[in-house]
Amino acid sequence: MVVVLIMTTVALAAQDVVPVPDDVMDIFTQLNVYFGSLAGVAALSTFLAALLNGALKVTKKLVRQLVAWLVAIILIVGANLLNYGFAAEFSILKSILYGLGAGLVANGLFDIPFVKILMDTVEGWFQPKTK
């Protein structure tokens, strides 16, 4: 039990901290920061989803969460298609999976270490068995 608590503390201390952008120009000047990790994409999708929710005047909580998930998926699939950032070499399905993970983080449902474990587990299901 103690080992699990220590490992959790180490994992939480080792996660990347990416600030949420202050304005739209922050995104363009620090593009490599926001597309460099899952935490960066989650921070960027939080900001862009808030902009979209404000522009579209979305009030329902479920719709707000769906917007954040769609923004995160579009960002990672777009980065994959443009061969940019940490998702440059992903397949389309893996990009969608990581987009869902970034959406979970952007909505505040899970944190980065848990989502990384979840992504590794799901990827392991589809890896061929080696002997």
Image (cartoon, rainbow, N blue to C red):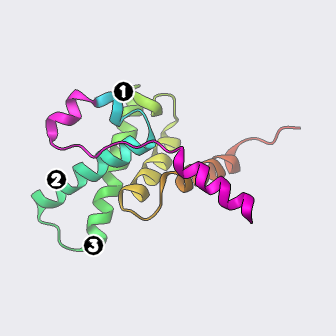
User: Where 79 falls versus 108 (above or below)?
Assistant: above
Marked residue nearer the N-terminal end (2 or 3) = 2
- Of tags 2 and 1, the one toward the viewer is 2
Residue at 32%, 62% (x, y): give it: 66
Which residue occupies the extreme top position in the image? 83
Q: Nearer the viewer, mark 3 or mark 1?
A: 3
Q: Would you name the residue on which mark 1 appears?
A: 82
Q: Which residue shows up at 39% across the image and 62% down it?
A: 108
Per the image, label 2 sits on a secondary structure element best described as helix
Query: Label 1 sits on what residue type?
Result: Leu
Q: Quadrant of residue 60?
A: bottom left
Give amino acid for label 3: Lys
100 left or right of 115?
A: left
Question: Is there a contact, CB below 8 Å, between mark 2 and mark 1?
Answer: no
The numbered mark, 3 or 1, whose residue comes first in the sequence reads 3
Q: Earlier in the sequence, mark 2 or mark 1?
A: 2
Q: Is residue 68 above or below residue 88?
A: below
Left or right of 110 in this view: 117: right
Spot occupied by residue 77 in the image (x, y as percentages of width and height): 39, 39
Q: How far is disc 2 from disc 3 in space, using C-alphas?
A: 15 Å
Residue kind at label 2, given as amino acid type = Leu
Judge whether residue 88 is colored magenta.
no
Quadrant the C terminus occupies: top right
Question: In this figure, which residue is indicated by the disc labeled 2?
Answer: 51
Residue that mark 3 sits on: 61
Q: Position of residue 39 (x, y in %)?
A: 42, 45
Magenta-highlighted residues: 1-30
